[in-house]
Image (cartoon, coloured by chain):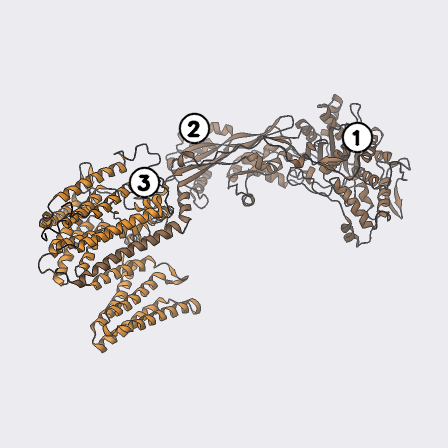
Chain colours: A brown, B orange
Amino acid sequence: MDGNYELEKRKYVIGGAATVIIIVYLLRLFTLQLLSEDFKISADSNAFLKRIQYPARGSISDRNGKLLVYNQPAYDVMVIMNEQVGVDTLDLCESLDITRDWYEQRMTEIKDVKRNPGYSNYTQQLFMSQLSTEEFSRFQEKLFRFPGFYIQKRSIRQYNYPYAAHLLGDVGEVGPEDIENAPDHYYRSGDYIGKLGVERSYEALLRGEKGMEILLRDARGRIKGRYQKGKFDEAPIPGRNLTMSIDLDLQALGERLMKGKLGSIVAIEPSTGEVLCMVSSPTYDPRLMVGRQRGKSQKMLAQDARKPLLNRAIMGQYPPGSTFKTSQALTFLQEGIITPSTSFPCSRGFHYRGLTVGCHGHGSPLPLVPSIATSCNGYFCWGLYYMFGNRKKYPSVQDAMTTWKDYMVSMGFGYKLGIDLPGEKRGMIPNAPYYDKAYRNDWSGLTVISISIGQGEVNLTPLQIANLGATIANRGWYIIPHVVKKVQGMPIDTLYTKKHYTKVDRKYYETVVAGMRQAVLGGTCRLANTSMYEVCGKTGTAQNPHGQDHSVFMGFAPRENPKIAICIYVENGGWGATYGVPIGALMMEQYINGKLSEASEARATHFENKHLYTPVEYSLNSPSEKDEKQQDQ
Amino acid sequence: MWKSIDWLTIFIYLVLLALGWMSVCGACYDFDQTAGILDFSTRSGMQIVWIDTSLLLAFLILMTDDRIFESLSYIIYIGFLALLFVTPFIAHDIKGSLSWIKIGSFSVQPAEFAKFGVALCLAKVMSTYGFDVRKLKDFIICAILIAVPMGLIVMQKETGSALVYSAFFLMLYREGMPGCLLFTAISAVAYFVIGIRYAEVPLWGMEQMSLGHALVMLLIQVFTTGLIKVYGGEKKNCWSRVLLFSLLVDACAILFAKYIHPCNAVWAMVAACGFTTVYLLYLSLRDRALPYLLIALFTLGSMGFFYSADFVLNKVMEPHQQTRIRVLLGLEDDPRGAGYNVIQAKIAIGSGGLEGKGFLNGTQTKLKYVPEQDTDFIFCTVGEEEGFIGCAVVLLLFLSLILRLLHLAERQPYTYGRVYGYCVLSIFLFHVFINVGMVLGLTPVIGIPLPFFSYGGSSLWGFTILLFVFLRIDAGRNRFQR
């Protein structure tokens, strides 16, 4: 051996170095592969293009099967940047009816990775959204001249009739708060969501479930087939079709009759709680809220002083006026304050200790039934006075008030009824603490006497008034009103099949029904009388400190086995008999007979043209169509 | 002869070949590919051809007389030099590289084979009587023998392949080249790579201080004290004093900058090094001890080298040259720029987890996110499809191969065999070190293949020849003893 021993020891240095290198690499591999999930996520987001497959949204029809809302194809123009070379821009702009500037601006936007994070030269990018069928067919013919441009089909909502905008609602792009608040992170930017009406309240059922197609994408953004031959793909679940409880003909008539008036009509089938029509006036054509014009329509309607977007039937909170007297009669009877034969005096009103609540001229004293029929204010003021002053039954006025409030709440007042529409208001039923605070504990039945005739602090929504009618029609119970009768493939929520009983016995209801029948036969509602069926009704003339009284009618028909209970509320309409009663009569005839008689038809036309203000037809003016397109993009 | 062949090495070789082929399959497979993995129109099919021919080549080498290699050493070396010289003139340009010669429908890269010639020649030269690397003249001869082919390959614009030849210095170290030379060279590379790599990274959130510079200063301090401990003679006990002093100064300066007054504490670290130098100079004068002078020179030289390199890179070089060096160090962090490869490689490996995604199931590699995924970045496929277990198996196989070769080299009765053996193992070590390191983001990105894994006939044949010539020499080791 010529090498010395010292040098041979260097083999340990070399072998050691090799070993150290490998150990360091193994440690590095350990940290890369086993300690962090980040790389796995990065690799998946690199390679997997999760393409969402949108389910078809459920259609909506009325109770008789008339299709109200359906899906219509719309067409998006897509572009693949690195294929769209040599396109005649001028020709393209002309075919799509856009300006050159808009084209340039749009192209820059698409390429801006900050605003369009999913940008790739090799994949389809949205160029222009929601072409109408005509625009599409015009563009389709020339499409071969524009390489790199493609058409992608998607669907938008379309409406068959110009009615029931508030009930149906609309769909629009999800906002940031929708994305945030969705429990399962269902929505992504650009998705559609129900904004109003049943489109919103039944969103989860209507929309279905999105599917997912997992595609493999290479480094240049090209699709290289489906991952594991589609083993992990999820098919979309189509949305469920809804059948509404609305009768479209009744709805249409209601909207016609309310033209030029502010207010609401709500009709309920008493035996089921199904809402037969719900009119809020002014209303608008739901087709305004479709497609690219939605944003502009929305803005126009939101700015209108008469608030056409407000669904007055469930959001308007009004004094119920004399229609409320029925609930008072029921309470007094059940509490034993009065019997049907109890009479109270009324000399053009209630006079006591210097307090006066006026009334119109009628015979005096009157028992309960004619008091309801003539809508005597005095009778119900005395009733409340005796109830709140009864110290044998109620230790204090507060206790009397609480008992009274419980009756009201059992009839569906003071809280949201729970209708299947968004935005319902609860109305107002005062309670003892409320008055304690307002009057510093110094108050009596006399102080709050006006609540007995549906004035003062009491506020109800037209839906609650209609529900009162339905409760009386049922003689003591109601089912929570709802606008959806059937959901495809599943039973309706038990919430909408359960009977809610009030605190009043059936026998007392019969007395009130008799009073309401009397009102139609010879009282305030004579205009509603007809030989075809027995109508029961109650007018209301709600005092309005800001102007003309509101005209109210609550009624149902026929008397036995009632088919329809209804509330008409016309703001500033004056006497209940002026608008409320005749409109209510027409509505009941339409629903029970399925059509109007000739004479009624003439009357309907008369009321259609009898306006309290000049009606506005909401529509978008077309001249500014072009800049609107630009804004919407 | 067959009895004295080292079958263990052949076994490791065959396992690596098989694993390598699987990786090439994984790297080249396309999800929408219709041809089978054995089809010759695919790279995995072609790799089978290269493997078969390599096995034939190995068999032929084993059948020859081992003495033939020794006697032909110079001729083979000169032949390769000539080939390397003409290559740039007859090569066709592949991505700016002029190293490929076209023969028929195949391309051959002479640089991959030339290592073999250099190894033979070095072995032959160093086994001549009286040759000693420790003598300056003999060392220079070796250096020239290595430098000439290196230069020729640089002219082919294949810097990576040229750098492989520096692996021969590891063999020279074994044969007696002073360790401090190797140490100095490695230190220089470390300063350069670490200093530049982390130059822009702020230290402890302080923008005015560069982590790279601070790390280099720390390295110099540690190396200096290490040298004192090893070469310091009787006075070597002062190493702990020097280290303590340096670290104290570093810590105080950094804490001062962090909490009291923001300043560049690196200058304090430089000052600490300077003070150490002065102290060492004083010791060498007082004790008339040469090692202290040399250590002081090392410390001073280290600082000088680092700052001049930094200056040259940032002030003298053109921007595009700077970029090239930064790319080489994996410094460009723009995801679509030069750092892209390294990032995607890390993602590929990291996403493999413990067991990997399974054979042909890797998405990073198959969807072309990792560039060069079947050649330089093939280790990504192993990481992605076979996971940590697969990677560990492959790395441990390479380690066993290198350690086995070390053992075989040491058992050679003659310098010729030993030198050649060390050449082979150094080359394997260098390739594995750089290739796997760059995929893991630890070493600069230098485009050299992973032995037996990267796709291509030239590299596979080159490594096979290197290895089997050594096995043939090893098989003949007992000839004269019997």
Relative placement, left or right, of B59 versus A270 is: left
Relative placement, left or right, of B86 versus B286 is: left
Q: Mark 3 points at which residue?
A: B26
Q: Where is residue A122 in the image (x, y as percent from the top left)?
A: 38, 38
Q: Is residue A606 visible in the rendered structure shown here? A: no
Residues under labels 3 and 2: Cα distance? 45 Å
Relative placement, left or right, of B234 versus A84 is: left
**Residue type at numbered disc 1:** Cys
Q: Which of B460 and B473 is in front in this view?
A: B473
**Residue type at numbered disc 2:** Lys
Q: Is residue B77 visible in the rendered structure shown here? A: yes
Q: Residue at 73% x, 27% y: name it.
A: A604
**Residue type at numbered disc 3:** Gly
Neighbour tally class for label 1: few under 14, some 14-19, many 20 plus, Cα within 10 Å: many
Q: Residue at 21% x, 41% y: name it.
A: B457
Q: Which of A7 and B349 is in front in this view?
A: A7
Q: Mark 1 points at which residue?
A: A536
Q: Residue A142 carries which label?
A: 2
Secondary structure, mark 1, is: strand
Q: Residue at 40% x, 28% y: name it.
A: A144
